[in-house]
Image: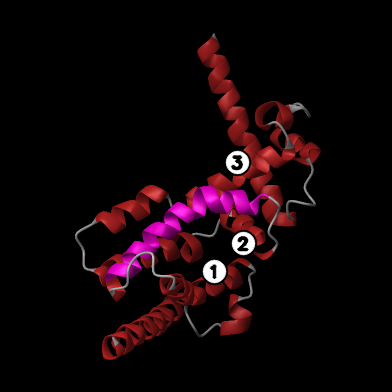
Amino acid sequence: MKKIQREDGQATREKLLTCAGRLIAAKGYEATTSKEICELAGTNLAAVNYHFGSRDGLYEELLRVVHQHLMSLDAIQDIEASAAPPRAKIRRFLATFLRQTLIKPSWELRVWARELLHPSPLFEEIFTQNIVPKRDLMLRMFAEYTGLAADDVRLRGIVIGFMAPFAAAFLIHQESQYEVLYERELSLVTLVRSLEQFAFAGLDSFVVSRSETE
């Protein structure tokens, strides 16, 4: 009996998260109420507080789920620990990131896009717990490629500069402005290849200039 209750409770939690995600993806966190979430999930109106403690608690858990969907820590660890050459690791990371963000549209990505554009008070905690460990693995991959130490402050700017075009494409794609800005003739595949060529050109330029000056 207790096992059935636990399974029912987990199913309710997952349904609340999914319904909250769909609503927040459509209208934003501030405009979404616990009542709306419970009504869509078909649960008691007190279900959000019962399972998550509060509406903020539900959203915090939702952001963790969303970032796991975007790219799991395990996936990045596998890439970073592989025996592949540094460039191949970065390209594999990019392929995984782009497959999740541009090729597979979902409400999870829409929620994350909203959070990036309009950060909630929970963003700092989510950043520390979920993003920093992944960022640190990325820094190690780029350190291996550039020859810089993993704790070299220049690496953070390099990673931001490298990923910026892809992050911009992700946000534009989620906002459904892709065809307006890039025209129908430019396919998503062509765009991604162009961005990758551009990003690696900048990265390689840094590596060459560093070797000439140090």
Q: Residue at x 62, y 62 (%)?
A: 113
Could you say which disc has been placed on residue 61 in the image?
3
The answer to which of 47 and 79 lies nearer the viewer is 79
Residue 180 location, x and y as percent? 63, 81
Residue 175 lies in the magenta stretch: no
Q: CA distance from mark 2 to mark 3?
A: 16 Å
Please tell me whether mark 2 sits on a helix, a strand or a loop.
helix
Against 20, residue 86 (above or below) is: below
Q: Residues within 10 Å of mark 1 (few under 14, many from 20)?
A: many
Q: Determine the main secondary structure of the stretch shown in magenta.
A: helix
Residue 84 location, x and y as percent? 21, 63
Q: Residue at x 48, y 48 (%)?
A: 68
Q: Amino acid at mark 1?
A: Phe
Q: Residue at x 61, y 31 (%)?
A: 13
Residue lying furthest left in this view? Answer: 83
Q: Nearer the viewer, mark 2 or mark 3?
A: 3
Could you say which disc has been placed on residue 144 in the image?
none
The C terminus, quarter of image: bottom left
Residue 42 appears in the figure = no
Per the rendered image, the range of residues in magenta is: 122-144
Q: Is residue 201 left or right of residue 23?
A: left
Q: Earlier in the sequence, mark 2 or mark 1?
A: 2
Please tell me whether mark 1 sits on a helix, a strand or a loop.
helix
Q: Amino acid at mark 3?
A: Glu
Against 32, residue 206 (above or below) is: below
Labels 2 & 1 near each other (Cβ < 8 A):
yes
Residue 139 lies in the magenta stretch: yes
Residue 182 location, x and y as percent? 56, 83
Could you say which disc has been placed on residue 113 in the image?
2
Q: Earlier in the sequence, mark 3 or mark 1?
A: 3
